[in-house]
Image (cartoon, rainbow, N blue to C red):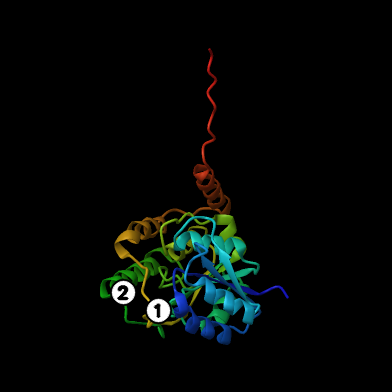
Amino acid sequence: MRPRVSVVIPVYNEGDAIMPCMERILRDVLLPAEILLVHDTPDDTTVPYAQKLAMADPRVRPVLNTYGRGPANAIRFGIDAALAPVTVVTMADGCDDPRQIDGLARLVERGVVVAAASRYMPGGQQVGGPRLKRLMSRWAGLSLYHFTRVGTRDATNSFKAYHTDFVRQVGIESRAGFEIGLELTAKAARARMPVAELPTIWLDRQLGESHFDLGRFLPSYLRWYRFAFGRRLTMEQLAARRVRVEAAEQPVPSVALETTS
């Protein structure tokens, strides 16, 4: 049976900390689904546990990211590898509520291209986490919601569902970190495509170690924050951006120099 939703989870040396998170996802996702555990290297400490889960449940797919290291590339690879028409991105740290994956996916099935789990709408909440990061995220989300009409109060949250074909058409330009959620929300807003949100309660991770580096990722977040304020773009224009970015990343072929004796 073809899955209705592909759940993409970038992992990095989670080890056995991945197990409680996966147990909740496998229990709470009721739609026909595949769960892609995307790792950067074969020796990632998550891999043995991912393989064990895959043997026990056919919904689990450990996949090796070949687009380059880092969470952005892992998410890009996972969406490209997804088999379902709806893709949900969630984190391996257990901070997101897996019971909402079905609801987010159903919003996309009803016609939106981005469905966000929102900490900052009525009924949502963020518990724990660095105070500066919380303040900046809330300010960015609410200001974008009121001034650019992006359709969600939580554009920076990574926990979102996407229409898979929409993502593949407009492309993902992010290469640094977790700013993909903001990028795709901003692109949907610029194209005047529908975005919706559901309230969520985000809980700071209890196991393992966070790999989020605010100083490193902040410039990329600011880039897409500014992008959201631009004029309307057509889907064709966004697709052309994707083509230009992909072309710029292609290696320049080396030209053999002829020598004469």
Eyeballing the image, is 44 above or below 222? below
State the residue in front, 68 or 250. 68
- Quadrant in the picture for the N terminus: bottom right
State the residue in front, 2 or 137. 2
Question: How far is the residue under mark 2 from the one under mark 1?
Answer: 10 Å
Quadrant for residue 86, please give it. bottom right
Query: Can residue 192 be seen at all in this image of the molecule?
Result: no
At label 1, the amino acid type is: Arg
Q: Give residue 185's position: percent from left, percent from top.
A: 47, 64
Residue at the extreme top of the image, as rendered: 261
Residue at the extreme left of the image, as rendered: 132
Residue under label 2: 134
Badge 2 local density, few (<14 within 10 Å), some, or many (20+)?
some
Query: Can residue 21 be seen at all in this image of the molecule?
Result: yes
Q: Give residue 69's position: percent from left, percent from top.
A: 46, 58
| Total numbered labels | 2
**Which residue appears at 50% of the width and 62% of the height?**
41
Q: Give residue 216's position: percent from left, percent from top.
A: 32, 59
Eyeballing the image, is 194 above or below 119? above
Mark 2, secondary structure of its residue? helix
At label 2, the amino acid type is: Arg
Q: Seen in the image, is 84 located left or right of residue 250?
A: right
Q: Earlier in the sequence, mark 2 or mark 1?
A: 1
> Which of the labelled discs sits on residue 45, or is there none?
none
Badge 1 local density, few (<14 within 10 Å), some, or many (20+)?
many
Quadrant for residue 214, please give it. bottom left
**Which residue appears at 56% of the width and 81% of the height?**
103
Quadrant for residue 228, please give it. bottom left
State the residue in front, 38 or 25. 38
Q: Give residue 101's position: percent from left, percent from top.
A: 54, 79
Mark 1, secondary structure of its residue? loop
Residue under label 1: 119
